[in-house]
Image (cartoon, rainbow, N blue to C red):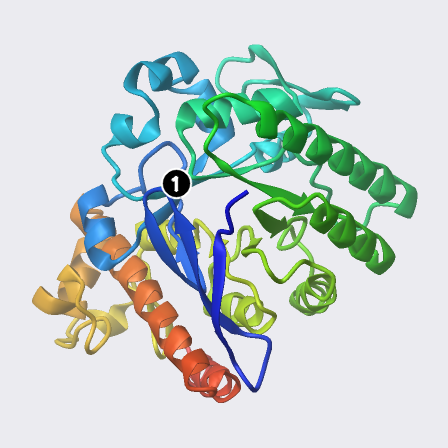
């Protein structure tokens, strides 16, 4: 098995680390944020623009791509890269979280998950092997194993049972993937254990022992308090193999990203940046601003000084306010490009801070400014 992760430097003031993840469609500099392309497209922006910003790893959704367009279509195109004309890397989740969110439409059994499509009610089954087959059809550069994601507050025995199922499925998937002809996806195991520290430790050590190419930390950012997220993230990473790329799913705000980086996480994704943009909210160094607010009506300044996105280079906050207020499609598209550009630049600043052994101070200064005033 090839080694995906190369550590370049560890920050002297924290567990933040600088590295690379080498994949079939290019090298990813880490820590890195991944835009989410659920249905094979990052909403509101061309793939070419995503690439031009600097991204070469985006996320696709196994559950949604399995239902539409379906594996037959993907197979006919030789995978999602050709179908969507995306030249960079693709990471796909297992669909486990989407099935978890459909609590009234699914049933977890020993062999897999039985669920009904949210589109037409048709019945389907995800097994550890089938999920890998789907991701093989997608042509994922990184693929996730099927896991059982649980909400906060469940009893210990229920959390342990879900963890044991996740472990059994991970082992099945690893053994199957190792023998699957033509399978090139780099499979990541997923740590679970809910919000019980002994289970988190047990899961991290077990998943690490299976020697996956990479490891994801699951079951966080599922509705728990921010302080609980911080605590369990720090605890879990203590026991995860640090020679592999480490991934936390579903985080995309600066405070959560900084917390993840501080604990040695390399990869993360979230729909927040694009969803916010479609609703007229954008990232700036001085916090999130809501473009619908009247305060921006006569503002001649760009969204963010120095930003290279189209909105900041060519238009004012006043014009963006106008676009959002009138419901113009272009407003959401430009806000999307801005938010993704902002996060890409944010990650470059983080990587430079790690390289120069000043990450802790960078985090402190950044958050003080970001939360200093409301917009």
Q: Is residue 116 above or below residue 58?
A: above
Residue lying furthest front: 1
Q: Locate residue 271, reporting x and y percent.
A: 43, 49
Q: Is residue 230 above or below residue 13?
A: above
Query: From the viewer's perspective, is 50 left or right of 37?
Result: left
Q: Is residue 119 above or below residue 89?
A: above
Q: Locate residue 348, reporting x and y percent.
A: 34, 71
Nearer-the-camera pick, 235 or 222: 235
Q: How many marks?
A: 1
Residue designated by label 1: 90
Q: Quadrant of the C terminus?
A: bottom left
Q: Residue at x 35, y 54 (%)?
A: 27
Query: From the viewer's perspective, is 321 left or right of 177?
Result: left
Q: Locate residue 227, reporting x and y percent.
A: 69, 70
Q: Residue at x 50, y 46 (%)?
A: 2
Q: Locate residue 206, reporting x and y percent.
A: 77, 47
Q: Residue at x 26, y 44 (%)?
A: 44
Q: Secondary structure at mark 1?
A: strand
């Amino acid at each position: 098995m090839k080694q995906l992760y190369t550590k370049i430097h560890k920050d002297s003031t924290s567990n933040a680390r600088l590295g690379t993840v080498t994949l079939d469609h290019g090298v990813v500099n880490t820590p890195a944020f991944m835009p989410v392309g659920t249905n094979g497209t990052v909403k509101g922006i061309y793939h070419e623009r995503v690439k031009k910003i600097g991204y070469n790893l985006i996320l696709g959704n196994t559950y949604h791509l399995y239902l539409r367009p379906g594996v037959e279509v993907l197979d006919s195109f030789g995978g999602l890269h050709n179908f969507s004309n995306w030249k960079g890397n693709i990471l796909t989740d297992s669909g486990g979280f989407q099935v978890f969110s459909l609590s009234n439409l699914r049933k977890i059994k020993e062999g897999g998950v039985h669920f009904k499509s949210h589109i037409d009610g048709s019945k389907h089954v995800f097994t550890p092997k089938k999920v890998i087959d789907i991701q093989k059809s997608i042509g994922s550069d990184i693929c996730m194993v099927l896991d059982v994601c649980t909400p906060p507050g469940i009893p210990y025995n229920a959390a342990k049972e879900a963890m044991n199922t996740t472990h059994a499925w991970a082992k099945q998937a690893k053994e199957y993937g190792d023998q699957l002809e033509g399978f090139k996806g780099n499979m990541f195991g997923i740590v679970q254990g809910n919000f019980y520290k002994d289970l988190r430790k047990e899961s991290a050590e077990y998943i690490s022992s299976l020697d996956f190419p990479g490891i994801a930390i699951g079951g966080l950012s599922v509705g728990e308090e921010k302080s609980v997220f911080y605590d369990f993230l720090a605890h879990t990473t203590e026991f995860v193999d640090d020679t592999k790329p480490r991934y936390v799913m579903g985080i995309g705000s600066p405070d959560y990203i900084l917390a993840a980086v501080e604990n040695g996480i390399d990869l993360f994704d979230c729909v927040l940046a694009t969803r916010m943009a479609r609703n007229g909210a954008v990232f700036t160094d001085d916090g999130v601003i809501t473009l619908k607010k009247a305060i921006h009506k006569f503002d001649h300044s760009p969204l963010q000084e120095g930003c290279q996105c189209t909105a900041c280079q060519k238009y004012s906050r006043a014009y963006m306010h106008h676009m959002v207020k009138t419901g113009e499609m272009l407003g959401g598209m430009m806000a999307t490009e801005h938010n993704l550009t902002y996060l890409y630049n944010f990650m470059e600043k983080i990587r430079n801070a790690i390289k120069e052994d000043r990450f802790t101070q960078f985090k402190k200064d950044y958050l003080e400014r970001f939360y200093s005033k409301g917009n």
